[in-house]
Image: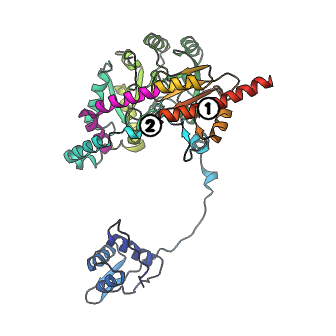
Amino acid sequence: MFTDFKYTADRPAYLQLKEYLKEQILSGLIQAGERLPATRELASTIRLGRNTVIQAYQDLEEEGFIETVPGQGSFVSAVVVEAGTTTRIPWDQLTTPYAASAVQLDIEKSELKWERGMISFKSIAPDGNLFPTEDFKRAFLHRFALEGEKLLNYGYAQGYRPLLEYLANYLKQKGVDPEGKAILVTNGFTEGLNVVLAGICAPGDGIVTENPTHNTALKIFKLRNLKVYGIPMTPDGIDVDALAATLAAKPVKAGFLIPSYHNPTGLVMPPAKRQAVLEVFARHRVPIIEDGFNEELRYSGAHVAPLLALAGKGNNVVYIGSFSKILFPGLRLGWVVADRALIATLESIKRSMNIHTSFLDQALLYEYLQNGSFEKYLRRARKVYRQRHEAAIRLASALIPHRRIWGEGGLHIFVELAPQINARAVLAACYRRGVLFMPGDLFYTDGGGANTLRLGIGRVTEEEMAQGFKIIGEVVSMLEGEKSASI
Ligand SMILES: Cc1ncc(COP(=O)(O)O)c(C=O)c1O
C-alpha cells in the first residue's frame, strides 16, 4: 500500500502526500476507521522524510480527514462524498438570447486559426519582445514593498488613488480641462465601453459610429440591442455631412468615435474636422463616446488634441482610454473620463459588476508610469512601430494590388481592394498558403467592406511582411485575373 505515491520535485512533498491521501480516502480506498501507518513507517515506504509525513497528517487532521488518538495512531474519519440525487440540465435550452448572441458574435470561435509556421496579420496587439519586463519587475517589487498589504485587500471602485491622480495629470498634458470631470479605472477599454453603455444606453437606443469601426465595439452594441447607424468615412475621417443628416433624422442616444489611429482604417481625424464633428454633436445635444486607445502611437505630424480636450469645459465627451496598445494588453487596464456626476453613476455600475479593477495591477502600473519607465519604453516602442508601419505601407503599396491603402499610425494598415474582389476569398486562398489577416467586413456596420482587409503589424518582422504581403498580392492578382477573364 502507498507504493503508488509519486513525488515530483516541483511542489512541497507534504502537499503532494496530503492530496494523495485525501484522494485515497475520498475514493474509499482507505475506509473510515482504518488506521494509517505510523509516520516513520510511511516515510520509509514512500522514501521521504518523516517530517513530511507528520506535516501531511497534521493538515489532514485540521481539515477533518483523519483523527489522531494519542498512543494509538491516526485513524481515517468518516468522510464520505456520496452522490445525492443527480440530474442533468439542458443548458443549451436554458441560456438566454443574450448568451446566444454572445456566442454567435464571438468571432474567435469561428475564425481561421493560426497554425505553427503561418504568418499572421490578424492581431493588432503590441510586440511582447519589446516589453520592458525588467523595469516592470522592479516597479512591482518597489511598490509591493511599500504597500503590499494594502494592495492585496479590497480597494475603491473608482480606482487606486495615485493612479487616478497620475491620469488626471496625464490628461491635463493633452489639454483636457479637468473642471467638473472625474476618472474611473476599468478593466481595459472593453469594460469601459460596457460600463458607459450600461449607464447611458438602453436596448433599442440608437448609436452613431464611423463605418467601419472597431469590431469589438460593434459586437458590444449588437449584444446590447442598440440600433447602430454607421456613417461612411472619407479619406480624412467620418463624413460630417452624412453624420449631420443622421443626427437630424434619427433618434441617436450617443456617438462612438475613434478619432486617432482609427481601427480599422488607421486614420487620424484632422483638427478642423474634429471641430466640425464636435459642433454637429453639440447642435443635436448628443454626447460623444471617444475611444482614445491608440493616441500615443503617433509617428509623425503635430499633436492632435482629443475631442475631450477640444470640448473644453463642456461635459458632452466621454473619453475611454486604454493601456492595451501603448503598454500591455494583459494588464487589462483602461479608464473613463467624463462629467463627475456621470462617473459617480458609472462607479456604482462598475462596483456592481466586479467591485473594482485589481489594485495590485493598478499600483504596479502607477509605479511604472510615474518612475519614468513608461516614457522610456514609449520612445523605443514608437521608433520600432514607426519603422514597421512605414515598411508596411511601402510593402503593401508595392506588393498588393489595391484601390487605396489607409493608415497613418498605430499597429495596423487597412487595404481597400478593387471593388469586385472579395477579401474573404483572398483570405481562404492565403490561408492555404500560410497567411492570415482580418477580413474588413467584420468592421462594417452594414455588411459592407467585402473588398477590404486589415493587416495587423505589431508582431511581425519586415521580412514576414514582405513574404506575407507578397502572397496576399499574388492571390489578389490571381482573383483579379479570374474576374476580368469572366467578364
Ligand atoms: C478601437 C480599439 N479600442 C480599444 C482597444 C483596446 O481594448 P482593451 O483596452 O479592452 O484591450 C482596441 C484593441 O484592439 C481597439 O482596437
Query: Given the image, on which type of amino acid does mark 1 rest?
Result: Ile
Q: Is disc 1 placed on a helix, strand or loop?
A: helix
Q: Relative to residue 310, is residue 460 drawn left or right? A: right
Query: Given the image, on which type of amino acid does mark 2 rest?
Result: Glu
Label 2: how many residues lie within 10 Å, few (<14), some (14-19) or many (20+)?
many
User: Of helix, strand and loop, which mostly describes the magenta segment?
Assistant: helix
Measured in 3D between alpha carbons, the distance from the residue under mark 2 to the one under mark 1, in whole angstroms, is 35 Å
Give the magenta-colored segment's residue range.
360-389
Residue 191's tag is 2
Q: Relative to residue 339, is residue 397 drawn left or right? A: right
- Where residue 125 appears, as percent x and y from the top left, is 46, 36
Q: Relative to residue 163, is residue 305 drawn left or right? A: right
The residue sitting at the right extreme is 486
- Where residue 237 appears, as percent x and y from the top left, is 52, 17
Q: Is residue 332 above or below residue 243?
A: below
Dot 2 beta carbon under 8 Å from ligand 1: yes
